[in-house]
Amino acid sequence: MRPKPPNGWERRLPAFLHPPALLRERASLASERVVTPRLALVFLTAAALLLPWTVLLFLTLPGRQQAERWNIAWGGFDALLILVFTGAAVRILRLSPKSAFVNAAAATLLVVDAWFDVMTAPTTGELVQALLMAGLVELPMAVICARTALRVLSLLEQARPYLVEAGFTIADGRLVPPPGGTPPT
């Protein structure tokens, strides 16, 4: 079966922005979407708007800056990490697929933590310490968190064909059991 060309708003996009053919294989996919493809356009627009702003920051911000409430900024960030790690642990123990989200957030925060620790180290000694922490603790932990998130998402992706075969559908972003079936409690 040859994929259908894009229709509607997708047709007005440059060819490289068209959704993959895989997303157009079945006409019913539009009703089965959990997230509208228009959201991708929002993210692409945000990235495009952020690009000149980022260049401006690189060119105009001072190379050195003192910050007020530095202790609260870093303490608050680490408190946020504590909350995310606790949330990840709870979601994992509950066998919740939402652990993918929490682990992805933890991975992101760990990479940001490593980046700012290294970039804001004021002395050579503190830079070495930040690099060691990043290389031995923060980034390996970020990899574990990202891998955990991907494993959970992979399992959900693998389950989809079986759910479709059993008659489940998606409507309004929710899994709908086949007629006569009962939703899980």
Image (cartoon, rainbow, N blue to C red):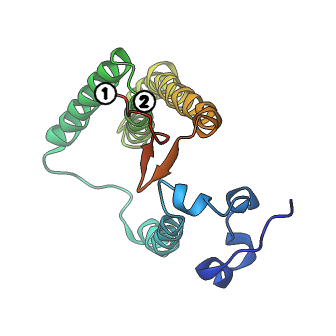
Question: In front here: 101 or 114?
Answer: 101
Q: Quadrant of residue 151?
A: top right
- Element type at marker 2? loop
Q: Could you tell me which quadrant the N terminus lies in?
A: bottom right
Residue 173 location (% of width, % of height): 42, 52
Cα separation, mark 1 vs mark 2, equals: 15 Å
User: Which amino acid, by three-letter code, is at mark 1?
Assistant: Thr
Residue 140 location (% of width, % of height): 52, 22
Residue 185 marker? 1
Check disc 2: other Cα within 10 Å, few if <14, some if 14-19, many if 20+. some
Residue 93 location (% of width, % of height): 34, 14
User: Which amino acid, by three-letter code, is at mark 2?
Assistant: Pro
> Along the horizontal axis of the image, is 111 left or right of 90?
right
Q: Is residue 56 above or below residue 158?
A: below
Which residue corresponds to mark 2? 97
Check disc 1: other Cα within 10 Å, few if <14, some if 14-19, many if 20+. few
Which residue is at 27% across, 22% downward?
86
Question: In front here: 170 or 107?
Answer: 170
Of the image marks 1 and 2, the number of the one nearer the N terminus: 2
- Residue reaching furthest to the bottom: 12
